[in-house]
């Protein structure tokens, strides 16, 4: 068996190295390596995008392009589909694993799938990843993929590739039944992201899923259970960093990693051991601020966290309660001020456009954050199939998946696109005076996944 793992290009306003870790394909590669299966990763994504016309389905954004504090234009981050298909065809794979890390990028995966099938008509294509897990039937209807994989496949990947019908529901949707056990474990992967003159940057995920059930979150679609890697596997993971001459920075892509603080502390102890203390960390999605206190903030400071990324969501307590967030703005202020007193840079994410929240309410949340020592990140609400309020799959047959991006500012609920963009531009303007707290690039983050 010879397996091609293929990562499609991305079309969007911007793309960052943090989003280019592609831990899913790296995990597949590790599983195949351990099983001595010949394989190769084909990554169509390129870090430097080139301008392309704004897609027709996003035409409503055209009047805002080039506005102060808004995006200048749309880009394609990656090689052309036909070129990538030729590279894969020259490898002569017996199986293709096509990745889609978010449903919002379904069109990019589907476009490449057509080119792959044209170049290799007799080679089965398995599509997987968080984007597929959200709505596997969509990909079977709209693309030439042979199988759409829902959820995790760590336990049975090779068996699935050898006998897919044994794992299929009869319609082409595949699930790894061995991963339906909430107590099953997995081996983490470590993905090199970039390298500077003095630091090697990596991403990893040592836990999956989240025990929370926030209504707007799609994590459970790909990872239905909250599970952790064993500490022995974490040790094996970080042991590979021994002897690294440069400083090591590890970004944990976990969701709510610090819910088990003892586990987290032991993980950091292992990282410290294998890097000789020459490390720093970040957690893009990994902190629920309600589990933090002064002692834990001091711990984070001592283990060299470079930025505290915490989700504020909203200052409207009724909206928070509706979305199963049990706190109030004062709780957030206490943590933000505590982190600032320790000189920990903070990015606070406000979700713009939640169901039931209007522009005035969102703006009050923005003004609240403006009074705190934080960098403000705007996360425009976007729908994902099978999340709360969007269980009807037919909704997604009449719109483009591209509207399911935060950068699309699509009016899913009570706010118009114009209002969402006004919030985004205002946040960027507020951040201009806070450049010492920026990430070094002078821009506001948008949180997607």
Image (tube, helix red, strand yellow):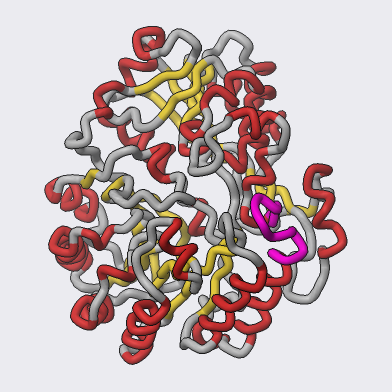
160 versus 445 height, above or below: above
Is residue 412 shown to the viewer in this render? yes
Q: Residue at x 72, y 32 (%)?
A: 398
Up-down relation of residue 262 to residue 94 (above or below) = below
Q: Is residue 248 left or right of residue 168?
A: left
In the picture, residue 434 is in which quadrant? Answer: bottom right
Residue 438, placed above or below residue 27 = below
Residue at position x 47%, y 60% from top? 194
The answer to if 417 sits in the magenta stretch is: yes
Which sits in the foreground, 442 or 359? 359
Apparent side of residue 328 relative to residue 54 in the rendered image (left or right): left
Where, quadrant-wise, is the N terminus in this rendering?
A: top left
Examine the structure image and report whether residue 418 is included in the region drawn in magenta: yes
Q: Residue at x 50, y 70 (%)?
A: 316
Question: What secondary structure predominates along the stretch shown in magenta?
Answer: loop
Image point (36%, 67%), residue name: 282
Which percent across, then down, holds residue 265?
17, 65
**Quarter of the image where one finds residue 331:** bottom left
Q: Nearer the viewer, residue 433 or 96?
A: 433
Q: Position of residue 211 (x, y in %)?
A: 28, 49
Specify the segment rendered in magenta.
408-420
Q: Position of residue 37 (x, y in %)?
A: 34, 23
Q: How far across and how far down the image is residue 40, in percent?
A: 45, 31
User: Residue reaching furthest right?
Assistant: 63
In this picture, residue 337 sits left or right of residue 50: left
Q: Is residue 438 left or right of residue 287?
A: right
């Amino acid at each position: 068996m010879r397996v091609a793992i293929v990562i499609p290009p991305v079309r969007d306003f911007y793309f960052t190295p943090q989003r280019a870790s592609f831990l899913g394909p790296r995990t597949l590669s590790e599983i195949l390596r351990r099983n001595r299966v010949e394989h190769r990763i084909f990554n169509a994504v390129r870090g430097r995008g080139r301008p392309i016309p704004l897609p027709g389905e996003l035409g409503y954004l055209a009047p805002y392009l080039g506005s102060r504090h808004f995006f200048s234009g749309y880009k394609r981050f990656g090689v052309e589909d036909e070129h990538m298909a030729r590279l894969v065809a020259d490898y002569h794979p017996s199986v293709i694993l096509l990745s889609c890390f978010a449903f919002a990028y379904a069109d990019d995966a589907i476009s490449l799938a057509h080119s792959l099938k044209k170049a290799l008509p007799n080679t089965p294509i398995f599509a997987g990843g968080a984007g597929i897990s959200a709505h596997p039937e969509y990909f079977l209807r709209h693309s030439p993929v042979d199988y759409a994989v829902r959820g995790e496949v760590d336990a049975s990947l090779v068996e699935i590739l050898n006998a897919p019908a044994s794992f299929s529901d009869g319609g082409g949707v595949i699930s790894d039944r061995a991963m339906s056990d909430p107590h099953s474990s997995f081996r983490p992967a470590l993905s090199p992201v970039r390298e500077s003159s003095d630091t090697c940057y990596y991403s990893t995920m040592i836990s999956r899923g989240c025990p929370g059930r926030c209504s707007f979150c799609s994590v459970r679609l790909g990872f239905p259970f909250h599970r952790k890697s064993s500490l022995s596997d974490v040790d094996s993971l970080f042991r590979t960093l021994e002897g690294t001459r440069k400083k090591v920075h590890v970004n944990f892509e976990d969701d709510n990693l610090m819910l088990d603080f003892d586990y987290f502390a032991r993980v950091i102890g292992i990282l410290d051991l294998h890097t000789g203390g020459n490390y720093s960390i970040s957690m893009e999605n990994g902190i629920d601020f309600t589990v933090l206190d002064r002692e834990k903030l001091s711990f984070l400071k001592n283990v060299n966290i470079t930025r505290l990324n915490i989700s504020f969501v909203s200052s409207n307590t009724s909206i928070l309660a509706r979305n199963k967030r049990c706190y109030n703005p004062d709780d957030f202020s206490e943590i933000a001020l505590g982190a600032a007193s320790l000189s920990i840079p903070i990015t606070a994410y406000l979700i713009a456009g939640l169901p039931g929240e209007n522009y005035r309410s969102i703006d009050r949340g923005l003004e609240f954050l403006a009074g705190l020592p934080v960098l403000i990140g705007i996360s425009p609400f976007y729908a994902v199939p099978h999340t709360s309020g969007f269980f009807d799959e037919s909704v997604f047959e009449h719109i483009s998946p591209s509207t399911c991006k935060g950068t699309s500012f699509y009016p899913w609920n009570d706010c118009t696109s114009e209002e969402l963009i006004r919030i985004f531009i205002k946040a960027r303007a507020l951040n201009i005076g806070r450049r010492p707290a920026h990430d070094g690039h002078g821009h506001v983050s948008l949180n997607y996944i």
